[in-house]
Image (cartoon, rainbow, N blue to C red):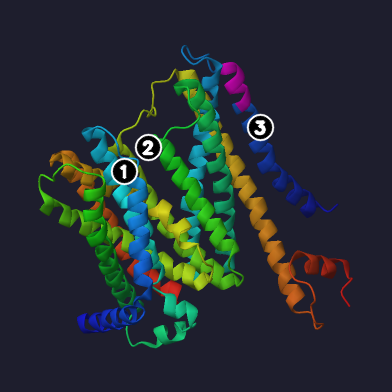
Amino acid sequence: MVGQLWFMIHKDLVSEWRARHAWPAMFVLGAVVALLLSLQTDLPPREKSRMVAMLLWLAVYFAGMIAIDRSFAVEREDNCWEILRLYPVRASVVFLAKLVVNILALTAVEIVLVPLFIVLCDTPQLASPAALLPLILLANIGLAAVGTLLSAVTARIGRDNLLAILVLPLVTPVLVAAAEASRLVMDGDFGPLWSAWMRLLVSFGVIFVTAGAVLFEFVLED
Amino acid sequence: MSTALHATVRRAALVPLCTGALLVAAGLGVALLAPREATMGDTQRIVYVHVAVAWCSLVGLLAAAGTGLLYLLRRHLVWDHWAQTSAELGWLCATLTLITGAWWAKAAWGTWWTWEPRLTTAFILWCLYSGYLIARHSIEQADRRARLSAVFAIVGALDVPLVIAATRLFRGMHPVSPTMEPSMRLVLWLNVAGYSLLFAWLALQRRRQLECAEQLLSLESRLPTEPTRRGGAGARDVAHGWHA
């Protein structure tokens, strides 16, 4: 299973590397969104952390959707769903491989966007920057799980611009939880509320990774 | 008319009659039985309808997901018809929830809309329904439409508890189970029961309509001639015997 999963991840990473012309669009969109949103953050420090955290996650969402929309670009453009079905692996393994690639893509977006937001919005110095790492990982898992499954659904539908409409309402709990937890990290508040938001992110990740692995088979079939 | 036909007509008329009677009772309860609320006055009466349609909008999504799951397990299009019916009625109820909620909010809070967590939840539910219906109408093939719609409905239903949990953590100003007079509570339950029955009756009618449309399309596809038109117009031609 692990060998199959690595094989599928490697295949998708090679495919993404060869089609890297799509990456600049993702980073530039993220930077433009960050710049435009940072114009609205001339606020007192207490309100600023809340605003910056929400705007950061919105920018990650919009830039990340470009990457997630590409999850099944080859299958959609070349209509090679049959080939994907012929791989001697379970549908859940295909889903998990695409999920891992999307998590990596979202992480790449955040490596650019988080420092950019800190500079552009002149955020207060983080009390504990390491606390952002588990938060970012959990949020990425939630966003990528829903995004990967629905990217496959919209690719099967074959209609453009549907992904963002379908994904945004579903990932609202992740965006709200990630933004609130990020705000608490900025304020250095790691109390029960921070734990509650982190638990919500864990629950979201567990539910939607499981649901995606189970339901993907139905999306893949002809 | 034969006795069997009489019995069928009587049975068919029973459900809308009961629904109508309960809705009239609920309406009279709102107008006459429920006392005038001290601070908000008559505007508070919107709550009875608002809570009932909000309940139906939640039930609609759960029904769409449940029947979607049954379609995935059984692969019979009748479950997809139920899913479509539930989603369409759920969307209607979600829209009414937003309208009645905004009306109430204007009287209570002085604004039509605020990004208060519970309002946001209602709006997200409406967006889920809208996305579901847009996705459905983008797929031509019936089996694929049923399968992909079922997946989306199940994911949507799984999301709702998490949306509610997120909004509770966010803390809002929306009243949660406020204290009510017994007569107010009775009227509220009457409305919930009435609108739930109306939902069920409309669902039955719409499901029959979808089944008839399916049968007509199936008959049309069996015609030996080259069809020049598709969908309802072709089906009507068959029904009127105009097709060559």
Q: Which residue is mark 1?
A: B166
**Chain ID at mark 1:** B
Ranked by sequence position, the earlier of labels 3 and 1 is 3
Q: CA distance from mark 3 to mark 2?
A: 36 Å
**Chain ID at mark 2:** B
- The answer to whether B64 is drawn above or below residue B222 in the figure is above
Could you say which disc has been placed on residue B117 in the image? 2
Viewer-proximal residue, A176 or B2?
A176
- The answer to whether B82 is drawn above or below residue B10 in the figure is below
Q: CA distance from mark 1 to mark 2?
A: 8 Å
Q: CA distance from mark 3 to mark 1?
A: 39 Å
Estimate the x, y position of residue B99 in percent, counting from the top left: 55, 35
Disc 3 + disc 1, Cβ < 8 Å:
no
**Range of residues picked out in magenta:** B27-33
SS for dot 2: helix
Horizontal side of A25 relative to B97 (left or right) equals: left
Q: In this view of the protein, can residue B204 be seen by the observer?
A: yes
Whether discs 1 and 2 lie on one chain: the answer is: yes
Q: Residue at x 80, y 83 (%)?
A: B224
Mark 2 is on which residue type? Pro
Q: Which residue is mark 3?
A: B21
Estimate the x, y position of residue A117 in percent, counting from the top left: 25, 50
Instruction: Tell me the quarter of the image containing the C terminus of chain B.
Output: bottom right
